Amino acid sequence: GENVEQHPSTLSVQEGDSAVIKCTYSDSASNYFPWYKQELGKRPQLIIDIRSNVGEKKDQRIAVTLNKTAKHFSLHITETQPEDSAVYFCAASEANGNQFYFGTGTSLTVIP
Amino acid sequence: EAGVVQSPRYKIIEKKQPVAFWCNPISGHNTLYWYLQNLGQGPELLIRYENEEAVDDSQLPKDRFSAERLKGVDSTLKIQPAELGDSAVYLCASSYGGGPTYEQYFGPGTRLTVT
């Protein structure tokens, strides 16, 4: 099955700086890569996703890049704010889109 | 639109006792997932349903865990007997399989503490 690795496990940045979280996957058949944000004690919520036919996608301060050849994808958060502090999970999905494999999470702290 | 509903939100039981969790997915979502999330880890799939059929239960410890999704809507996950290592958050999620997006919507989870 798919194996998703995520780095770093913890990340601290100053408010206004950028944050980058990286994930790698093993199954070349995976074609859908969502990112979830989970605040303390709350449910994971989708913040952005990308499909394998696209190399980059941006939504305001959040962007995701995908390198299919290298099998890695990254989350970029610019102009970070304290409310961005949370645990972020990447995931990779099999071709049918119904089986998700999650990374181990990155705990992001934005220091005011 | 109501989100995924789970109950109870918290459960504390002694080891060897049984426990059950309930999930009501988003209306119209035919795919339902049960995940286990340990502290500091990502969700790990326990079982996936397509309508009422369990299509992937390879990670479900079948000696003590069981699940059902009668009528292809609500689902229950049961542990009997519970062990100390079962303490975790149990997340339910649903998606509209085959739709234009694959987004999974998560419930708030049930935090289980086994003492």
Image (cartoon, coloured by chain):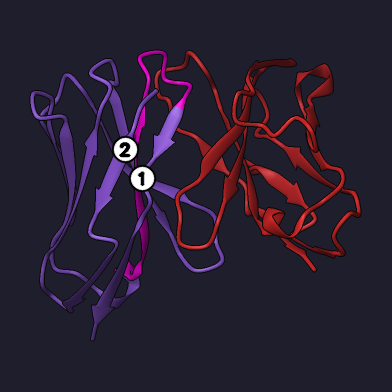
Chain colours: A purple, B red
Vertical placement of residue A50 versus B44, above or below: above
Q: Position of residue A26 (x, y in %)?
A: 25, 27
Q: In the drawing, does residue B15 fall left or right of residue B109?
A: right
The N terminus of chain A - image quarter: top left
The C terminus of chain A - image quarter: bottom left
Q: Judging from the image, what secondary structure is the residue with disc 2 in?
A: strand
Mark 1, residue position: A103
Chain letter belonging to callout 2: A
Magenta highlight on residue A97? yes
Residue at (74, 40) in percent of width and height? B23
Query: Of all residues shown, which one is farthest toward the right?
Result: B17
Front-lying residue, B1 or A51: A51
Front-lying residue, A33 or B62: B62
| Residue B80 lies in quadrant | top right
Q: Are marks 2 and 1 in contact (CB under 8 Å)?
A: yes
Magenta highlight on residue A5? no
Q: Amino acid at mark 2?
A: Val
Q: Earlier in the sequence, mark 2 or mark 1?
A: 2
Vertical placement of residue B115 versus B33, above or below: below
Chain letter belonging to callout 1: A
Dot 1 surroundings within 10 Å: few (below 14), some, or many (20 or more)?
many
Residue at (74, 60) in percent of width and height? B84
Q: In the drawing, does residue B103 fall left or right of residue B72?
A: left
Q: Specify the segment rendered in magenta.
A: A84-99
Q: Amino acid at mark 1?
A: Gly
Dot 2 surroundings within 10 Å: few (below 14), some, or many (20 or more)?
many
Residue at (73, 48) in percent of width and height? B6
Mark 2, residue position: A4
Q: Position of residue A84 (x, y in %)?
A: 30, 67
| Residue A85 lies in quadrant | bottom left
| Residue B55 lies in quadrant | top right
